[in-house]
Amino acid sequence: MSPIQAPQKLILARPRGFCAGVERAIEIVEIALKVYPPPVYVYHEIVHNRYVVQDLGGRGAIFVDSVSEVPDRGVLVFSAHGVSPEIREQTKSKKLKVIDATCPLVTKVHMEAILFAKQGRTILLVGHQGHDEVVGTMGEAPERIVLVDTPADVEKLEVEDPEKVAVITQTTLSLDDSKATIDAIKKKFPKVVFPPKEDICYATTNRQIAVKELTNLADLILVIGSENSSNSKRLAEVSQDKGVHAYLIDDVSKIREEWFANVNVVGVTAGASAPEHLVQEVIDYFKRLGVTHVEEIMTVSENVKFALPPELSLTSSVR
């Protein structure tokens, strides 16, 4: 069998990779590891990327799925995806030192849920069953929140009062998929209310816009990100929906040369929780294949920065 000819060009999407919420969450764990004696515990994966988790784990972070796994008076960091009030209460009985790395945009959705619940509304949370962010948000008002994922979910929905319905959204959804579900909600509940600003985060939106632009230029797209990363999976789906085949890969080792048969241009992007060094390793891989033309397309400029939580802001000088 003759070797597959290497692609002629590599095009990188920008923005890609870490968003402000992910950068903040990782920085919080790094500072906590310097400030407090080990170990520092983290509730769930700090972000959904196995390389980030492995790196922090190697430096002394211990990732847990239950507060009961943390010893009394220990240090516990909440992940970027947020937690429910029930989890917060559990930490009090164990007298834990809690550091909250919840993304501020996720906190915004939690606050919306609390407000709409106080108004006596049925809250429709557009999101994916079992995602850490969804679990935490639903915990704010479990008796009032109903999870919907698709227009079909909306069609079979019955609510207490069709005139008192509100909508909140998981921050990492596909813009196109969530639009179809939200349109179905508007049709079924004409008096539905929404938050003043949309919930899907700026980084999710920007990365999806960049991938759509990439589909106009590339024959195939590689999305760097972990399988449990919702926003990374959405990037691959956006590409597929535009008719350009995409592969979601953890790292360069997952690439297969046979993918590039009859492919002249490869596009590359990375989910909001994927570190840039993984992108650079993919670039090096293609250079070894003989690709000499590498360019980057910029669709949106990002300069968002979130402040550290109060419990760490005074200790950030240790960095």
Image: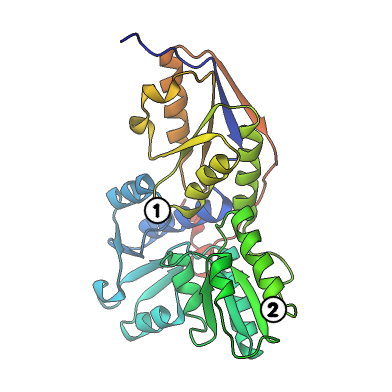
Q: Is residue 198 above or below residue 280?
A: below
**Which residue is rendered at x = 66% and y = 89% of the image?**
119
Q: Which residue is at the far top?
A: 2
Q: Position of residue 125 (x, y in %)?
A: 56, 72
Asked if residue 14 lies left or right of residue 196, the reply is left
Residue 201 lies in what quarter of the image? Answer: bottom right
Callout 2 crowding tier (Cα within 10 Å): few <14, some 14–19, many ≥20: some
Q: Is residue 130 above or below residue 250?
A: below
Per the image, the residue denoted by label 2 is: 189
**Which residue is rendered at x = 48% and y = 69% of the image?**
134
Per the image, the residue denoted by label 1 is: 228
Report the mark closest to the observer, 1 or 2.
2
Of the numbered discs 1 and 2, the one sitting upstream in the chain is 2
Q: Position of residue 159 (x, y in %)?
A: 59, 86
Mark 1 in CB contact with mark 2 (< 8 angstroms): no
Q: How many numbered callouts?
A: 2
Question: In terms of depth relative to the viewer, which is nearer, 279 or 256?
Answer: 256
Report, in whole angstroms, how far the alpha carbon at label 1 lies from the one at label 2.
32 Å
Asked if residue 116 lies left or right of residue 71, the reply is right
Q: Secondary structure at mark 2?
A: loop
Residue 24, can we see it? yes
Callout 1 crowding tier (Cα within 10 Å): few <14, some 14–19, many ≥20: few
Q: Position of residue 212 (x, y in %)?
A: 64, 39
